[in-house]
Amino acid sequence: MRAARCNAVGGPVVVEEIPEPVGEVPVDVHFAAVNFADVLVIRGTYQVRAEPPFTPGSEFAGVVAESAHGFATGERVFGSVFVGAFAERVAVPATSLHRIPDAIPTQRAAAFGVSHATAYNALRLIADLREGERVAVLGAAGGVGLAAVELAALLGAEVVAVASTEEKRAACVKAGAHDVLPYEDLKRGLRDSGGADIVIDPVGGPHSEQALRAMRWGGRFVNVGFASGEVPRLPLNLAMLKGVTIHGFDFGGWARHDRDRLVVTRAELNGMFADGLIHPRVHAVHPLDDVAMALTLDRRAIGKVLLEVARGV
């Protein structure tokens, strides 16, 4: 089968023929989503290391290739793995798979799983969002950011989306944001607009501290990644003076220490998806052979970038 391969730390990533994988449930991949964590794994800078050679990719949607563990051949499914999704086939534990609702296109399911689950867990599991609270989302036009905007609005929050361009901010309004801000003078802009009870930060860098300084008393700051490439050093005296709690969300840690709660939130989220309340935005779809281009994650992207995997091509 064909798969994208990383043969050395840092890449490059190239498409090669490799043996088909062995595992509980084999799935023929139709679409795979590109996440910033995939880029970090290739660079060797992610918190968990993948030893080359390996197939990158953590999110996919397709059809079950052979009946196994309660899944029937031909069933449409989506799921996640640490690595292996940028390939014509993956083989994963049954617990990593979810059936795609009949009314949902496979492509949309590929853009839903990881980003929306990250955002939902950050809002519900970590921040304990309550209706009417004010939520500021940094990097609000990215995969996780746009999902956080959409979900926070669905959960009854007043959403402030922070994004770098007018086009991105317009997309955030369409996703449910009540207010939008640029990054310039973020502390003043966020504070003057009413502050925030919750900050969802998938970006890191200098904007994290600016957002923290604009938070309301007793707020919750939740970091879910460092898309800027810079890990912020937040002054803890601000947390003390504002009564703010600073949290982080990482799937791996929760899966190891409290998987049961992840199962509950996943069921809630999948229910919202099946009911047609969630609409992942796909910015671009690249063929598998253009995996190197897809992995650049163009900063102009709004929403998710996908790979289309056509078996046997």
Image (cartoon, grey):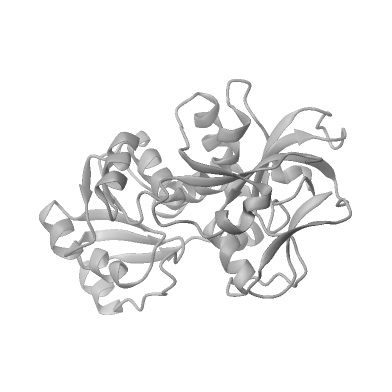
Q: Nearer the viewer, residue 51 or 155?
A: 51
Q: Is residue 171 above or below residue 52?
A: above
Q: Quadrant of residue 189?
A: bottom left
Residue 205 picture location, percent across and down: 35, 71
Asked whether residue 243 is in view, the answer is: no
Instruction: Please tell me how many numbered marks the rendered image carries.
Output: 0
Horizontal side of 203 relative to 50 (left or right) equals: left
Q: Specify the farthest residue to the top.
A: 103
Residue 286 picture location, percent across and down: 59, 45
Residue 11 picture location, percent across and down: 66, 70
Residue 305 picture location, percent across and down: 52, 47
Q: Residue at x 61, y 59 (%)?
A: 292
Q: Quadrant of residue 73?
A: top right
Q: Is residue 203 above or below residue 172?
A: below
Q: Residue at x 73, y 44 (%)?
A: 95
Task: Work out which quarter of the rendered image holds the C terminus and state it.
Answer: top right
Q: Residue at x 59, y 71 (%)?
A: 46
Q: Nearer the viewer, residue 71 or 127?
A: 71
Horizontal side of 115 relative to 59 (left or right) equals: left
Q: Is residue 48 above or below residue 313?
A: below
Asked whether residue 293 is in view, the answer is: yes
Q: Nearer the viewer, residue 115 or 2?
A: 2
Horizontal side of 291 relative to 28 (left or right) equals: left
Q: Specify the farthest residue to the left.
A: 192
Q: Residue at x 29, y 67 (%)?
A: 207
